[in-house]
Amino acid sequence: MAPHPDPHSLAGRKAELRRTALAARDALDPDARRTASATIADTLLGLKPLRAASLVAGYWPIRSEVDPRPVMKALAERGTRIALPHVTPDGLVFREWMSGATLVRGQFGLSEPDPSLPAVAPDALLVPLAAFDAEGRRLGYGRGYYDGAIARLSEGRTLLTIGICYAAQEVPEVPVEPHDKSLSAIVTEARTFHFEGTRG
């Protein structure tokens, strides 16, 4: 059995924040989660920078995550191309997805696009998270997949990154390491946090 992280170390602090925030998310009433997801979807669809993106990567929700599928469907109906993440040995790769296309079971119980499809480079990401703070710092699930993808996709260009989560997942401060990437915006059912030109 792996030893528990030292609670006083950075890894230990992150693990405790992640555990607390995910427990708060899981404790939300399912009806409240559905209502909150709908509110978040409405807010996202009102963001001009997201509407202007030509290729948006969402994700297929697991457990108690915010459900972005209504947003992906609405964007696709407006003509936006949609992609989904695929976990590979080299990190997170995005592949275009059409509504109704069959998904395959990936690592960690994820539903992913056909791995034979070519990789694409989205210009906007809807990012799931475990916890966040009001400065735009995101705490993921501990594997660094999105941090790596954000670093790669933002090389030489502007990448819109919008974290979506419930207000219950906010913490006073997320400790950061050099590889941790802040977000352009965070949308909850209670408030939208703008950080990098995402108003509108």
Image: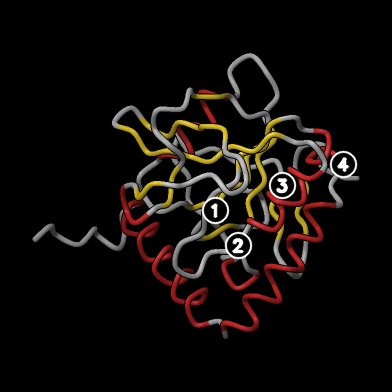
Amino acid type assigned to the residue bearing label 3 in the image: Ala
Query: Would you say 108 lies left or right of 197 here?
Result: left
The answer to whether mark 3 and mark 1 are in CB contact below 8 A is no
The residue depicted at 31 percent of the width and 48 percent of the height is 107
Q: In the picture shown, does residue 174 fall above or below 26?
A: above
Of 45 and 157, the residue lying toward us: 45
**Colouring style:** secondary structure
Give the mark nearest the N terminus, 4 or 1. Answer: 4
| Crowding at mark 2 (Cα within 10 Å: few <14, some 14-19, many 20+) | many
| 3D distance between C-alphas at marks 3 and 1 | 12 Å
- For badge 4, the amino acid type reads Lys
Quick one: label 4 or label 3, which is nearer the N terminus?
4
Q: Which residue is mark 3?
A: 185
Q: Secondary structure at mark 4?
A: helix
Please provide percent x and percent y for residue 148.
45, 31
Frontmost of labels 2 and 3 is 2
Q: Which residue is mark 2?
A: 67
Mark 2 or 3, nearer chain start: 2
